[in-house]
Image: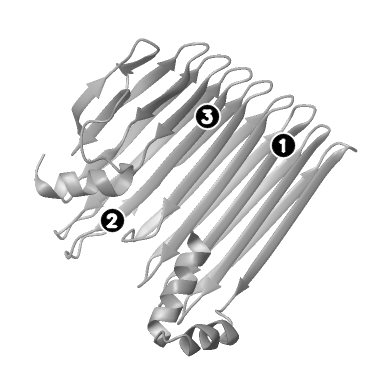
Amino acid sequence: MDDIQKRLLEEVAGLHEVPEGAYNIRSNGEGAGRRSTEHIEIITKTDKPGIDIHIKDNTVKESVHIPVIISQTGLTESVYNDFFIGENCDVTIIAGCGIHNCGTQKSEHDGIHTFFVGKNSRVRYVEKHYGEGDGRGEVVLNPQTIIHLDEGSYLEMDTVQIKGVDSTIRTTRADVADSATLVIKEKIMTHGTQHAETDFIVDLNGVNSGTNLISRSVAKEDSAQLFRSNIRGNNACHGHSECDAIIMDNGKVAAIPELEANYIDASLIHEAAIGKIAGEQLTKLMTLGLTEDEAVEMIVNGFLK
């Protein structure tokens, strides 16, 4: 890998060297390294681009890294990764995509990830998207995540996009079984004329199933964001959706929540707050010696932390 690719790998996966445990690194549309372990097997798909990740029952305290990096302008790809997670597991999966585009053509990566999480398993899924480059070519990322949670399972998804992505549509679909829980934490920042959309649909099908969807975003300059969430309570369940956004300059944010209670014991809540940085916050920080720009940066960083 050259220096650009190494920097992208560090940005999206925090990797300075080959990671411990299982990993699959994809660079400019091709495999750049892979390792399976005793409990985690990674297999190349034969019918379409992508991999299958099989995690055996009772696998605990292990991780999988599957970052994608693109430094070739004009490359457009869709990649399908399926995760088959056994019962009684406790694992961390670190994904994400970094694109460096210094050309005039669009570079795009669409990652379609499907999770089959076995009974009583716990999964932490981390996905970071990052773009850079001084060319006129767009950086486009359209991730799709499909989640199937079996009885008693838990999946926490941390997704971050805070720099350099011109256009993104982030789609998540999930169905949640008895006593299973889905937690999604999303952080997005846009600037310039960037556009970002989030679209969550969660079906709470099981008894005592639950979900908590939390989105925090900042829209700067002339950028625009759209947040849509639909929680469908189809049994005795609990669901919560929260969208908090800061708008700056000419930024625009729209939040469109939808709750469907299809069972008498479904308990569903949505909260949304959109507004500018409060003047008293700026004043307080500036009295401590910060410039206005430094104060704004501190507030935004704290908000997205």
Disc 1 crowd rating (10 Å Cα; few below 14, some 14-19, many 20+) is many
Q: Quadrant of residue 109?
A: top left
Instruction: Choose the circle earlier in sequence order: 1 or 2.
Output: 2
Instruction: Choose the circle earlier in sequence order: 2 or 3.
Output: 3
For the residues labelled 3 and 1, say whether their Cβ atoms are less than 8 Å apart.
no
Disc 3 crowd rating (10 Å Cα; few below 14, some 14-19, many 20+) is many
Q: Find the distance from the CA under tag 3 to the CA under tag 1.
A: 15 Å
- Element carrying mark 2: strand
According to the image, label 2 marks what residue? 131
Give the number of callouts.
Answer: 3
Q: Is residue 258 above or below residue 189?
A: above
Q: Quadrant of residue 181?
A: top right
User: Residue 208 appears at what percent x and percent y?
Assistant: 79, 30
Disc 2 crowd rating (10 Å Cα; few below 14, some 14-19, many 20+) is many
Q: Amino acid at mark 3?
A: Val
Say if residue 131 shows up in the picture: yes
According to the image, label 1 marks what residue? 210
Disc ID at residue 129: none
Say if residue 71 shows up in the picture: no
Q: Amino acid at mark 2?
A: Gly
Task: Judge left or right: residue 207 versus residue 123.
Answer: right
Q: Nearer the viewer, residue 39 or 202?
A: 39
Q: Amino acid at mark 1?
A: Gly
According to the image, label 3 marks what residue? 123
Disc number lying in front (3 or 1): 3
User: Residue 132 appears at what percent x and percent y?
Assistant: 24, 59
For the point 47% across and 85% down, the residue is 288
Task: Judge left or right: residue 299 versus residue 41.
Answer: right
Disc number lying in front (2 or 3): 3
Name the quarter where the N terminus is drawn. Answer: top left
